[in-house]
Image (cartoon, helix red, strand yellow):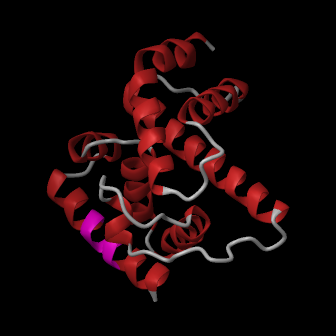
Amino acid sequence: MAGVSSLFARLYDRLYSVADDCLRRGRDHSLQPAGVVHEAYLRLVDCESLGVADRSRFLAAAARTMRQVVVDHARRRRAHKRGGGGGWQRITWCEAVAPVAGPRLDLLALDQALDELAAAHPRAAKIVELRFFGGMAEREIAAHLSLSRTTVQGEWRFARAWLHEVVDG
């Protein structure tokens, strides 16, 4: 699957940066950005039917895969701690997407909330996944999903508000 390999090589720095941002917001410091990116690559290469022909489709697949890697790791760590989560601090969604230091994000709560959002509003959930886990800009998301940038901006605002309500209750 040379297509995935060449796209991965060209976009490695970007994927690393996205993974680093995501992990800095999270509470678990046992996972490294390079590990997330490399595990995502291994999962993408194993997927024979992926058919990523262009950059935006690859970034979308990478976003979904990196989300799975981070969430799988968080689940394993929580299971290892036999219920874990003790002493974890809840934060707002707005704080979670801000690139500043502060309270840490519960990635499992975010993943569950994204699943709920996807059930009710699939396009909004996809935009969050592409932006948060894929590091895609609004214009890239708009092009990938064949939407206007204004629509993407509106869905992003809606999704942030919805997730804030669900995660922070």
Q: Quadrant of the N terminus?
A: top right
Establish if 163 lies above or below 62: below
Classify residue 66 by image quadrant: top right
- Residue appearing at x 29%, y 46% in the figure: 146
Residue sitting nearer the eye, 112 or 126: 112
Q: Which residue is drawn at the image coordinates 57% and 64% (left, top)?
A: 111
Q: Is residue 33 left or right of residue 151?
A: right
Q: Is residue 119 left or right of residue 95?
A: right
Q: On the image, which quarter does residue 14 sit in?
A: top left
Looking at the picture, tell me which residue is in the foreground, 86 or 79. 86
Q: Is residue 52 magenta?
A: no
Q: Main secondary structure of the magenta part?
A: helix
From the viewer's perspective, tell me whether residue 131 is left or right of residue 62: left
Question: Can you give x and y, in whole percent of width and height, for residue 99 in the image?
Answer: 31, 52
Q: Is residue 89 visible?
A: yes
Magenta residue span: 156-161
Q: Residue at x 62, y 33 (%)?
A: 40
Which quadrant of the figure has residue 116? bottom right
In the shown orientation, is residue 19 left or right of residue 43? Answer: left
Residue 128 image point, x, y percent? 39, 58
